[in-house]
Image (tube, rainbow, N blue to C red):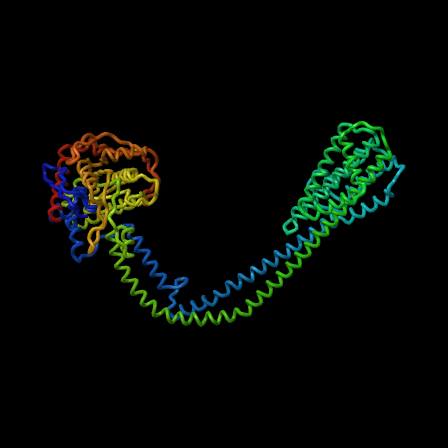
Amino acid sequence: MRGSGKRKVGPDNEDGEEEGGGGGGGGGGGGGGGGGGGGGGGGSGGGGGGGGARKERDMDLPPMPKRPSLVSIDSEDENKMVEVKTGICGLDPTTGKGKQIHLIQMLLLPFVPIMALIIQNSINMVSILEYQHDMQETIDQISTGLGNVTEALQSERAEIAFYLFTNGSIIRRNLSEHFAYTNSLIENLKWPAFRIDDHLFQNKILFRIRLDDFRDKITRFDTPNIEAGIAFYNRANYIFLDQLTREIKEKDASGVWRPLLAYKNMIRAIEHLGISMVFGEQYFGRGDLDQSSYIAFVTNDALGQDFLNASQNFAFWISTRYKALQKDYPWYSNITRRRLEILGREKIQPDFEKATEYFYAMLGYLDALQKIQYEIRKTIQHTIVKEMLASNSHVVIGIALLAVVLIISPVIIILVRMITRTLQAFSETLLHKTHELRFEKKRSDKLLYQMLPSSVAQQLRIHKTVPAETFSSITIYFSDIVGFSEMAYQSTPMQVISLMNVLYKMFDSRIDCYDVYKIETIGDAYMVASGLHMRKKGKDHAAEIAAMAIDLLHGTENFVIPHMPGERLKIRIGIHTGPAVAGVICTKTPRYCLFGDSVILAAKIESSGLPFKIHISQDTKDCLDRVGGFIVKLRGELDVKGRGVMDTYWLTGKHGVLPDRRPCSGKEEDMEFMADNAYSESGRRPKEEAKHQSSFAKTLGLFREILG
């Protein structure tokens, strides 16, 4: 871009002197372009340089090549035009065949929700059937099977404990009848898959054999004590209850989870209270309990009370029912008093009558609890039946809804066909007008995006005023090719253009990997800035520019000049960090420019650098030191007009690994790459260096004269 200051360049003043307030953002900022004269600035045979590129914009000549980022924007517009022009599957709805296929597509659309509804109803009905099956299994588990067997074993354990306690002198009822009742329940039970290693519970036959053997020992009084007599029943009831609660838990997907939990807790409460009853009976019959029996009584009594309280918490009516039991059962106060006596564990005189009284009182109490358990079971059954009836209603509603959809679907299809015909006729006219409008819009947008950054262009497109922005700190990059004028003089215009296209294509592919913005290129001059509009927060603009500069310098080391394979491309880079102003200049041909001393100073640092070197200012060096990871060497002092003498540095490399994110890169490259080049240090003679810098000064002076 054109700067607002002037720069005096001569053979004896290769660095140049700056005058004025700031440098243009695109052209090298008053000297940032290096050999900015381009191909045509070096002589009559070098056509197509920076001055020529400037005048192309003032005349009605073909536009300059687009930036890579702008190509993607144009591609988006082309894709949008394709979407308007063609239909689904790449068909053109304006042709006869396209209309027919499009009509078929539109007619198929109503079938999508219809099929979705059919599938949804089918899935719902299957789910409801599975739900009903689970509910039926829940009823079976709590009304028959394990539940009934567990209750029978609990009752049988109480009878046997009393039988052993009285030595068979008193029998509450015939044991053989009780055994036959339990056997019938076991025979009708569908034997579950117990999750234990005991082989006696692996099948029904082995369990029956073991149970009958134990009963024979009981009737022969072939057990050392009552605890041994009920041990088998305790073990069996524990396994059956564990399996019962697990199966109920696995089926608990309904709305009866509260009564189900209450039912399971009530079963557990009756089991533990039944065990504690046996030890309480022994206490009154013997007058004392040993340590293990006392611990067993306390443990089972506490667990029974805990499960009983938990069962009441899941349903209010259970609590009410239990309070009524406490009030109406005449032996409840006696049980409470006897329980406290046992917990006190005071030695008493054996009292057979008191033991018998306690046994019968506890049996009546457990029978009353079992009645509450039966009521819970009936409540669960009633709730499940209601839910199954409700699920049947859902099935009926789903079938009715499906029938309605099937009836009205032909009407929908006919209406869709009529609407499609109308739309096809209207689309033919609309498509033609839309194509013309988009073609013209594409041309205007293409020109706009070639001149401005995408964010600025977007604001101008929506008729927004783009105000000038002041940036407190940005990093500006300038680079040029040393000896470009001489190279252009020795080459044909097409060779120069081919060289610059290949070089800038490599540059553009690499800078796209960093959070930077390319301001402008004029001939061999290249200007980039970072910190204007950072794409990602948290990144440091100086670090982005520094990493990009190392990347570009590393890329030029392996760069081969197509028509001069024996020559090396000598790039010179300068970087400075400081404040600047950015804005859109001119309304007829708007351009995005950078202004300020930072632009001029960056150009000065670049022009005073050396080939194959990255020359940075003190401000940039301070920023890189804060970030860390960059290798910097002191270059020396530089006298800058208006700022005095300042220290400058060489950026020689960066620690770490450079990610393979460039399309031009074939592999990862070690970023502990030194920007110093042996060719630039030892192979460059002082006269050759002066010659290159003098050539640059002459070319840039010619470029300034062309711009006036």
* Rendered residue at 73%/33% (across/down): 298
**Total number of numbered discs in the rendering:** 0
| Residue with the most extreme right position | 169
> Residue 509, percent across and down?
29, 46
Residue 140, compared with residue 175, is above or below; it is below
Left or right of residue 637: residue 359: right
Residue 489, compared with residue 287, is above or below; it is below
Left or right of residue 139: residue 494: left
* The quadrant where residue 18 appears: top left
Q: Would residue 530 be seen by someone viewing this image from the given angle?
A: yes
Q: Nearer the viewer, residue 200 or 120?
A: 120
> Residue 666, percent across and down?
33, 42
Q: Nearer the viewer, residue 424 or 538?
A: 538
* The quadrant where residue 215 appears: top right
Q: Nearer the viewer, residue 109 or 366?
A: 366
Residue 39, compared with residue 287, is above or below; it is below
> Residue 209, percent across and down?
80, 41
Left or right of residue 663: residue 605: left
* The quadrant where residue 155 appears: top right
* Rendered residue at 33%/40% (across/down): 539
Q: Nearer the viewer, residue 685 or 158?
A: 158
Left or right of residue 707: residue 246: right
Q: Would residue 558 be seen by someone viewing this image from the given angle?
A: no
> Residue 15, percent across and down?
14, 37
